[in-house]
Image (cartoon, rainbow, N blue to C red):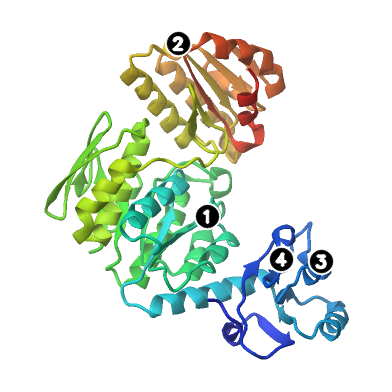
Amino acid sequence: MLSSRFLSQAPSILKTYGPSKDVELKINTDSRSFKSGETFVALHGDNFDGFNYVEQVISFGARAIVYSRKDGREIVVQTFTQNHPGILFIEATDSLKCIQELASLYIREWRAKKADRRIIGITGSNGKTTHKEMIYSLLNAIFPNQVLATKGNLNNHIGVPLTIFGLEDHHEIAIIEMGMNHKGEINELCAIAHPEHGIITNIGSAHIEFMHTMENIFKEKACLYQAVLVNAKGQGMFVVNADDEYLIHLEKSPGLTTYGEKNGDILIQMIDNKINFHINDQEVLITNNNILEHHNLKNLAGTSVLGMKLFPNKTQEIALAACDYQQPSMNRSQWIENIFLDAYNANPSSMRVSINSFVTVMKNKGVSLNDCYFVLGDMNELGVFAQELHLEIAEHVKSLGIKNVTFIGRYKDFYLKGFKDPKSSHLLKEEFHEEWKQIRKTYKFMFVKASRSLQLESLMSIV
């Protein structure tokens, strides 16, 4: 339980007004979902200021309020404290910094209570949330009600503290997903969460607009590994895919385990829906009929390796849990009847992997690509690399023998430089609606993928 006794240890806190007794702080940063008894953190940015909603959350029954110091605000706060003496008001140099400090203090105390508690960090260019869901499912199967994981994709400088505040005494494992799009963010998140074990999913060109080079992306993601080395003194369990051309270069440590179909300490054999490998002096066979995509089966292999390294005496139990694993609906990559839809995110590496996996699934089903249709939209956050990388994906699509394709979005002309004769191309998805109706009636399977801005999931409602 996060309590007000932590306040004296947070450097950003300047002063407090109100009750001096120890109270529970249930953190909420959203006035729209605020509930009685919670602590409201008034975050602020260039275009918003949560302090404007203080009166509203007071009427909802706020127990405490965290706010940033600002010229002219003291008189307003004094009025609040006089009118509401039962509410704890917490003044900080910055309200966000405050909850980050409190989260760091809280998880360190939670960890210190029991020697065998574990904090697992997850990052990577693609598949972070998928890996997180897999690790959570595998570990929760053998340690029910003892595992906490990031909800949804709350993996940034606000989401990580909110995840940490969900830790309770019955939890023994914390799984913290960490995202980034600018240099230094993974280090900041590690300073909050203090991971001692972890996994990097892959290194891809997501956010290359801000990071400029693939090497910079690798260095940023590798900050999680460096943090684990320090926090666990080189003994923390860490797993990476050795088939990744960047991750293979991580410096070795006693806790680092690499896996892959071509490279790694643990060689993975994958045929259809079967995964086979040796670990902890045991042979492991995982047969999963719920996952169609090759890359997600490989993700399941990697997360199983991490679980088995963390808990070697539970190797076969984790394997059984992996056999039963079903991917939850996350409004991301998912099969909707005969349509593979991923309208949440798209970057060159995830696009390539998803297309390759879809083609493999069709091959295994005995379905000709002539009976399939592909709808590809914009890949965002590529900056000056946008033209080159859209062209490369289009060339890759053509090299696979795909003929039935439509390009949609502001980058459609970049796709067209690599694939000059698609079935169609459109600037706006609305221009595609009538065509899509006929496609759904004509083709056996469809593949739809683009960045979130295009909102291609709306196609699912057009029949």
* 266 w.r.t. 404: above or below: below
Residue type highlighted by circle 2: Asp
From the top left corner, tell me how far across and down residue 279 is, in percent.
17, 51
Q: Are there few (<14), some (14-19), or many (20+) residues within 10 Å of tag 4?
A: many
Q: Are there few (<14), some (14-19), or many (20+) residues within 10 Å of tag 2?
A: some
Residue type highlighted by circle 3: Gln
Q: Nearer the viewer, residue 327 or 423?
A: 327
From the top left corner, tell me how far across and down residue 364 is, in percent.
31, 20
CB within 8 Å, label 3 to label 4: no
Q: Are there few (<14), some (14-19), or many (20+) residues within 10 Å of tag 1?
A: some
Q: Name the residue under label 3.
A: 56
Residue 109 position by quadrant = bottom left
Q: Earlier in the sequence, mark 3 or mark 4?
A: 4
Q: Which of marks 2 and 1 is in front?
A: 1
From the top left corner, tell me how far across and down residue 367 is, in percent.
37, 13
Residue 421 appears in the rendering: no
How far apart marks 2 and 1 lie (CA) works out to 38 Å
Residue 412 appears in the rendering: yes
